[in-house]
C-alpha cells in the first residue's frame, strides 16, 4: 500500500533523512521511534508533501506521490495529524471534524465519515459545540486525528500522538488508534518515547540521525540492549556491533 524506497531528504544543505525504506500494508500500524531530531517529523512531512525528497521513491497504492502537492496527496486518501494538532481555534469541534468532508467530497458520504470519527473518539460527542480554543491538549489531539479520519483516509500519519498528554487522556487516544487500525486502515506513527509505543503495533522502526537502525517487532527490540541503548540515548550508532 505505502512503499518508501531509499528516501533522502536535505534541508538547507543538511542531509536529514538517509536512504530510508519502509512498507506499510492495509491494517498495519508501523511505529517510527527515535529521539528528538532523529528525523521522524521530517519523514512524515515528506510523505505528506510538505517537504520534497532529494532522491528516492514514495508510492501510495502503486502511484508515485513524491512530487505531488500536499492537497493532492490528501485527495488520494492520506491523512496527517501533526504533533501540534493544529486544531482551528475559531471553529467548533464539530466544524473541525467536518472540514475535510468539505474539501474532499469524493468517497464515502460525509455523514458516514463523520460518524466514524465520533465512533473512534466517542468522548468528542459531548464536545461538538465547544470551540477549538477551549480544548485541552488531549482533546485537541483527538480532534486532530478525528479530522484526519473524516478525510476518508486509508493511511494516517500521526506525529507523536501521545507526547505531552496527561495520563488520564492517553487511554482514550490509544483506544482510538487501536480502533482505526482494526478498521483496516494503515497507520504510520512517530514517537520519541518507548513508553508511548502501544503494545499492539505491528512493526517498530528505530531511526537515529536520519537512518533506520532497527526494523522488527517490539518484543525483539525490547530484548536488544543496543537498540534500547540508542532509544535511551546511552549508546551512539557507531557503538552498535
Image: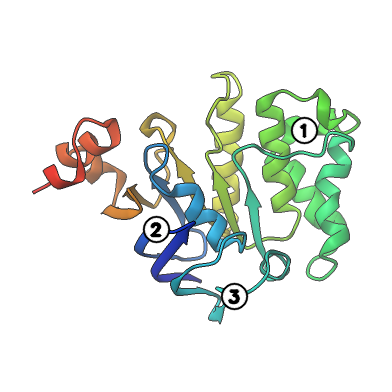
Q: Nearer the viewer, mark 1 or mark 2?
A: 2
**Residue under pointer 1:** 124
Compute the Cα span from label 1 to label 3.
36 Å
Q: Earlier in the sequence, mark 2 or mark 3?
A: 2
Q: Earlier in the sequence, mark 1 or mark 3?
A: 3
**Residue under pointer 2:** 17
Label 1 secondary element: helix
Q: In the image, 119: left or right of 174?
A: right
What crowding class fits label 1: few (fewer than 14 Cα within 10 Å), some (14-19), or many (20 or more)? many
> Tags 1 and 2 in contact by the CB under 8 Å rule?
no
Label 2 secondary element: strand
What crowding class fits label 2: few (fewer than 14 Cα within 10 Å), some (14-19), or many (20 or more)? many
**Residue under pointer 3:** 67
Q: In the image, 135: left or right of 194?
A: right
Q: Nearer the viewer, mark 1 or mark 3?
A: 3
Instruction: Count the numbered circles shown.
Output: 3
Residue 13: % across, % down: 44, 59
Residue 36: % across, % down: 42, 37
Q: Is residue 45 above or below residue 90?
A: below
Amino acid at each position: 500500500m505505502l512503499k518508501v524506497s531509499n528516501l533522502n531528504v536535505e534541508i538547507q544543505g543538511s542531509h536529514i533523512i538517509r536512504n530510508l525504506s519502509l512498507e506499510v500494508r492495509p491494517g498495519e500500524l508501523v511505529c517510527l521511534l527515535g529521539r528528538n531530531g532523529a528525523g521522524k517529523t521530517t519523514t512524515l512531512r515528506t510523505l505528506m508533501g510538505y517537504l520534497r525528497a532529494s532522491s528516492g521513491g514514495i508510492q501510495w497504492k502503486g502511484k508515485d506521490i513524491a512530487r505531488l502537492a500536499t492537497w493532492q496527496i490528501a485527495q488520494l486518501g492520506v491523512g496527517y495529524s501533526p504533533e501540534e494538532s493544529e486544531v482551528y481555534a475559531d471553529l467548533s469541534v464539530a466544524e473541525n471534524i467536518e472540514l475535510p468532508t468539505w474539501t474532499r467530497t469524493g468517497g464515502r458520504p460525509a455523514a458516514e465519515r463523520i460518524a466514524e470519527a465520533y465512533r473512534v473518539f466517542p468522548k468528542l460527542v459531548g464536545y461538538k459545540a465547544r470551540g477549538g480554543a477551549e480544548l485541552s491538549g488531549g482533546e485537541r489531539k483527538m480532534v486532530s486525528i478525528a479530522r484526519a479520519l473524516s478525510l476518508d483516509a486509508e493511511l494516517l500519519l500521526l506525529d507523536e500522538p501521545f507526547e505531552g498528554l496527561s495520563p488520564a487522556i492517553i487511554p482514550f487516544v490509544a483506544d482510538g488508534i487501536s480502533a482505526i487500525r482494526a478498521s483496516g486502515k494503515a497507520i504510520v506513527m512517530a514517537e520519541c518515547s518507548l513508553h508511548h509505543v502501544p503494545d499492539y503495533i505491528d512493526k517498530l522502526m528505530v531511526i537515529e540521525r536520519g537512518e533506520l537502525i532497527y526494523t522488527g517487532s517490539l518484543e525483539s527490540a525490547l530484548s536488544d540492549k543496543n537498540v534500547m541503548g540508542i532509544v535511551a540515548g546511552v549508546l551512539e550508532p557507531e557503538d552498535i556491533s
